Amino acid sequence: MGDRWHVEVDRSLCIGAAMCTNHAPDDFRLDTARQSHPAAPDTDANERVLAAAEGCPVEAITITLVGSGEPVFPPEE
């Protein structure tokens, strides 16, 4: 069994660019205010979600490992 990720979107940073929904349309949704949120906060680790986080122009998406809370994205400096 692979890693499980916890995905969060900081709505104070989200500008509604919708890059996340372009990269991972099944994993992110925009609400009526064009704010992004994960379709499921806990998900199997996958390249689409990582690409969405990496592609966010304001780095509003954070990914941590379920259980340990270890950061996946953004990586620790």
Image (spheres, rainbow, N blue to C red):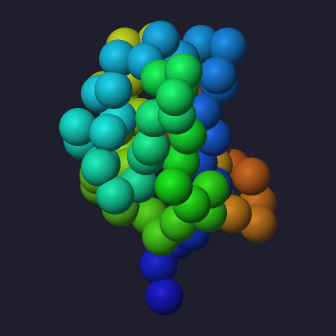
Camera-nearest residue between 27 and 31: 31
Q: Position of residue 64 (x, y in %)?
A: 63, 49
Camera-nearest residue between 9 and 75: 9
Residue 5 in sight in this render:
no
Q: Residue at x 44, y 43 (%)?
A: 29
Q: Residue at x 74, y 52 (%)?
A: 69
Residue 7 in sight in this render:
yes
Q: Residue at x 32, y 39 (%)?
A: 21
Q: Position of residue 49 (x, y in %)?
A: 38, 49
**In the image: residue 77, left or right of residue 66:** left
**In the image: residue 42, left or right of residue 49:** right
**In the image: residue 9, left or right of residue 26:** right
**In the image: residue 11, left or right of residue 2:** right
Occupied quadrant, residue 30: top left
Seen from this angle, which residue lies furthest bottom? Answer: 1
Q: Residue at x 51, y 55 (%)?
A: 39
Q: Position of residue 36 (x, y in %)?
A: 50, 32
Say if 23 sits above or below 36 in the image: below
